Amino acid sequence: MDALGVPRLSNAQWRALLLRHQPELVSEITPAADLIGSPFFDHDGNIGIDATRPTVSTRVTFTRIDGRTLPQLNYGFWFPSRPAEGPLDLYAGQLAGLLWRVTLDEAQKPVLYDSIHRCGCYHKLFLPRGTTIDMRHTSGEKPLVFHLDEGLDTDRGLRLCMAAGSHYIIDVGAPDTGMGAVPYTLRPYEEQLVLPAPDGLAHSLYGADGIIRQSQRVERFLFWPLGIPSAGTMRQSGMHATAFIGRRHFDAPELFQDLGLDFKRPRRNAEQTDSTHGSTSSP
């Protein structure tokens, strides 16, 4: 920790944590739209997803709660598309993505998992043992909350089961890597901001406004009065509004405190705090 209580780890230590908690992704079936891959620019300047190079973008962020600064491990998945489920599917379109985030305490143990789609929709909280939430005083649209099994081992990455096509996370459990599992590569999120293009230059995956126009959805015409520009469009980290009613952002530093989440302090950390104040903790 530095003088402000912010965790300071080396690049190698952060990477070790990212590898330790990287999730296993499982689809109900395996259509092309559910294969993760690496984004690239084709000769026409359009964005494609190369499923022959499964890659997950990673970045470390921080959250504030009850005077504590806790690190967060972010994993970003890209899919080629969200296929239409019918002739009037408002949510279908090119490119789709999923963000999975693991919040760690001072002992580097997970105290919360949450996810959104890359448009900012479908914010889901997955609470491990010891984490509680009280949203009675939370206004506006609320995220979905799920309690993980009490006996689930969170020392390693979890298994995310997603619905085919929509990429909704429908179950979270213990990893169970099978013989047909395909490994993916972890790459820094910043590489998406300087992707090589056929013109010989490097371009950001996102436009100047932080969104990917190619991924626009019809739903934007339905939700435009609610104040979110181009709702349903894939967008850059730091620009994910997660509520249509009220105001809430995925990367807001005090998001979890506003949602009424409570993370227990690690026992050793709590004892040190008591000792600082001149009291004695029982063994």
Image (cartoon, rainbow, N blue to C red):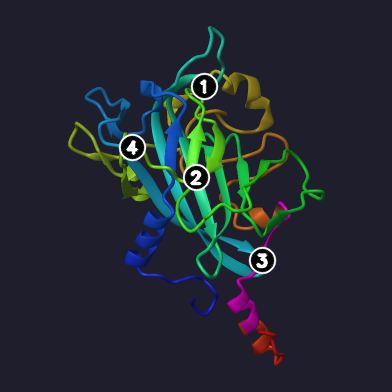
Q: Which residue is mark 4?
A: 181
Tell me the distance, in whole angstroms, between the alpha carbons under discs 3 and 1. 40 Å
Q: Considering only order in the chain, which callout, 1 or 4, is on the residue closer to the N terminus?
A: 4
Q: Position of residue 233 (x, y in %)?
A: 50, 29
Residues packed near mark 3 inside 10 Å, few (<14), some (14 to 19) or many (20 plus):
few
Q: Quadrant of residue 258?
A: bottom right
- Give me the C-alpha separation between circle 2 and circle 1: 22 Å
Q: Nearer the viewer, residue 47 or 28?
A: 28
For the residues labelled 2 and 4, the Cα–Cα distance comes to 19 Å
Which residues lie in the magenta part?
259-271
Task: Please name the amino acid that badge 3 sits on.
Answer: Lys
Mark 4–mark 3 CB contact (< 8 Å): no
Q: Amino acid at mark 4?
A: Ala
Instruction: Verify whether residue 42 appears in magenta.
Output: no
Q: Give the image location of residue 83, x and y in percent.
A: 46, 18
Pointer 2 or 4: first along the chain: 2
Q: Are marks 2 and 3 in contact (CB under 8 Å)?
A: no
Which residue is denoted by mark 3 in the rendering?
264
Count of number-bearing discs: 4
